[in-house]
Image: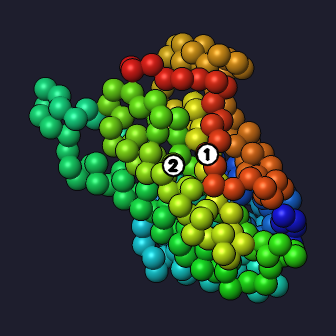
Amino acid sequence: MQIAGTSAIVTGAASGLGAATAAALAGADVQVIGFDLPAGWERSGPPASAGIVAARGDVTNGTDVAAAISLVNESAPLRLAVNCAGIGTAGRVLSRKGPHDLELFTRVVSINLIGTFNVLRLAAEAMAATEPVDEAGQRGLIVNTASIAAFDGQVGQIAYSASKGGVVGMTLPAARDLAQFGIRVMTIAPGILDTPLLAGVSEEFRVTLAATVPFPARFGRPDEYAALVLSLAAADYLNGEVIRLDGALRMPPQ
């Protein structure tokens, strides 16, 4: 699918994977709606590229997401939606402090899973209203972000793994649901990527953690995630699949 001259919405665009993806798309002549919480944009400052419009809101709020999508210029139809917004927390089902906090579990699932679905459904509606880009009837691509924790959840990752497992589980049925509209759905499951989630980790631990990756033995980079998004857009026959971006890493129990 040709994406130059089209529009995209990228969530979590103020930092990490979302920022890298928004920048890569803008560099490919895509008009990007960068969606993030107001606090996210306050921390990062305005987008570095003139091709990115900062939109503020919450992925779990339908009104916020619809308002961001409405910013798309009719001359550049929405062809891409990339869900990068998410949070990670640590907590066991049962610990010395008692059972896992239910509100915390609900919050993680709400942002990572329900927020992803909220953007998916509204972006799909906007894409379905556009004219097809080719004879096959293709209208767009939605890329969701899971995690290898969806498959190899570690001790203390019960909420995170459950939320990302839900994203994996949505991939195929979403692709089947949206096939009639010419909309593809793909999911990327990153391993250990060097994002703000690792900002508080000591250098010693970073070295130890990176060494667990078979090859290349390092953290992944946000720009590698962004490059994969561009590749998915170009590969029209990829649909309904989850791709691990993890250097062949399989996480141990802890």
Nearest to the observer: residue 194 or residue 191: 191
Asked if the residue under mark 2 is in contact with the one under mark 1, i.e. CB atoms within 8 Å, the reply is: yes
* Residue 59 in sight from this viewpoint: no
Identify the residue position indicated by label 1 in the image: 242
**Residue 167 in the image, given as x and y percentages of width and height:** 49, 52
**Residue 140 in the image, given as x and y percentages of width and height:** 73, 69
User: From what the image shows, is residue 43 above or below residue 177?
Assistant: above
User: From what the image shows, is residue 114 above or below residue 241?
Assistant: below
User: From what the image shows, is residue 50 above or below residue 63?
Assistant: above
Q: Residue at x 87, y 76 (%)?
A: 135
Nearest to the observer: residue 42 or residue 218: 218
Query: What secondary structure is marked by label 1?
Result: strand
Amino acid on which the number 2 mark rests in the picture: Val
Circle 2 Cα neighbour tier, 10 Å, few/some/many (<14 / 14–19 / ≥20): many
Which part of the image, by quadrant, shows the N terminus? bottom right
Query: What secondary structure is marked by label 2?
Result: helix
**Residue 64 in the image, given as x and y percentages of width and height:** 49, 76
User: Is residue 28 found left or right of 113 in the rendered image?
Assistant: right
Q: Earlier in the sequence, mark 1 or mark 2?
A: 2
Q: Residue at x 65, y 41 (%)?
A: 243
* Tally of numbered discs: 2
User: Is residue 236 found left or right of 69 in the rendered image?
Assistant: right
Q: Quadrant of residue 98?
A: top left
Q: Which mark is residue 125?
A: none
Q: Quadrant of residue 114?
A: bottom left
Q: Residue at x 50, y 57 (%)?
A: 170
Q: Which mark is residue 168?
A: 2
Amino acid on which the number 1 mark rests in the picture: Val
Mark-to-mark CA distance, 1 and 2 = 7 Å
